[in-house]
Image (tube, grey):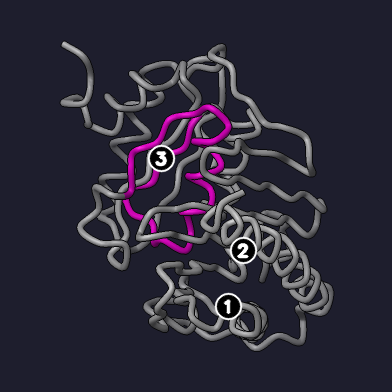
Amino acid sequence: MNQTEAALAERSALAREIAREAGLQALAFFADRAELAVDTKRNAQDAVTMADRQVELLLRERIRARFPDDGLFGEEFGVEAGRSGFVWVMDPIDGTSPFIFGLDSWCVSIAVTQNDRPAIGTIYVPVADEMFVAERGGGASLNGAPLRLGDAATVQNGLVGIGASHRVEPGLVARFVERLLSRGGIFIRNGSGALMLAYVAAGRLAAYWEPHMNAWDCLAGLLIVEEAGGWIHDPREWSSLEAGGLVVAGAAGTRWDMLELAELTERLPA
C-alpha cells in the first residue's frame, strides 16, 4: 500500500466510525424530537434543528482531531480550508423534514474529496442500521456485503427517485414528472436525496434525478452508485463544488431514458 492509498484507507475508516457515532447521536435526538427547537433558513420548508448543528459539530471535532490539515465543508457551518488536498463534505442529517416529522427516511452523509474529486463515500442510516460505503476504485458495499448493479432495471420496470427544492422552478419538476409518467415510469420521493442515491446503489431504486443538489447532499451517494456499477452525471460539470448542480444517476439500463428525461440528449450516441 502506497502513501496515498494509506491516507485514503485511514480516512475511510474514520468516515465509517464517525458516521455511526453521529448517527447514534442523531437517533437520540430523533427519539426525543418533541423537545427539539426547529428554525428555518430560506423558507418554512428549509428547516434546521439543534440536532443538525450538534451532529455536524461532532463530525468536525472528530475529523479535526485526526486530520487537522484536511478541509471541511458542511451544510450547517460552511467551509474551513485545509492544506492536505482532502476535504470532508458532510450533511449531518440529510432529510431534516422527515426527521422532524418522525419518518425514517434520513441519514448521515459523508464524502471525502481528494483534489476536488470524491474518493470516499459513506452514508449511514441509523433507523435501519445500514452503512453504505464506497472508495474510488474499490467498489461499494452495504453492511460489508458488496453492491453490484446489473442491467435489468429500467425506468419502466423500476422506481425513479426524484428530488425537489425551492431553489428550482416548480414547473421544471412538474415537466420531468409528466415526461416520466408518459414514458411508463413511476416516481417516489422520500425527502432525503442522499438516501435515495444509496437506494439506487442497492438496486432498490432504478434511478434518481434532482435538478439541483448541494455537494453535501449527494457526493457520497454519487460515488456509491458509481462504485456499485451504476452511472452518474459527473459533478465535475457543475460550475463549482460549492455551487452544487444537477444530479442524475441510475442503473445501466436506465441511462438513455434518464438522459432524455433530464434533457441531456446531447450525451446520447448518435
Mark 1 vs mark 3, foreground winner is 1
- For residue 98, above or below residue 267: below
Q: Are marks 2 and 1 in contact (CB under 8 Å)?
A: yes
Coordinates of residue 240 in the picture (x, y in percent): 25, 61
Q: Secondary structure at mark 2?
A: helix
Q: Which residue is mark 2?
A: 11
Q: Secondary structure at mark 1?
A: loop
Q: Earlier in the sequence, mark 2 or mark 1?
A: 2
- For residue 188, above or below residue 40: above
Q: Nearer the viewer, residue 213 or 103?
A: 213
Which residues, given as a range, are shown in magenta? 207-235
Q: Which residue is mark 1?
A: 67
Q: Nearer the viewer, residue 176 or 125?
A: 125
Residue beneath the point at 38% across and 53% down? 117
Coordinates of residue 24 in the picture (x, y in percent): 80, 70
- Report the amino acid beneath label 2: Arg
Coordinates of residue 25 in the picture (x, y in percent): 78, 76
Q: Secondary structure at mark 3?
A: strand
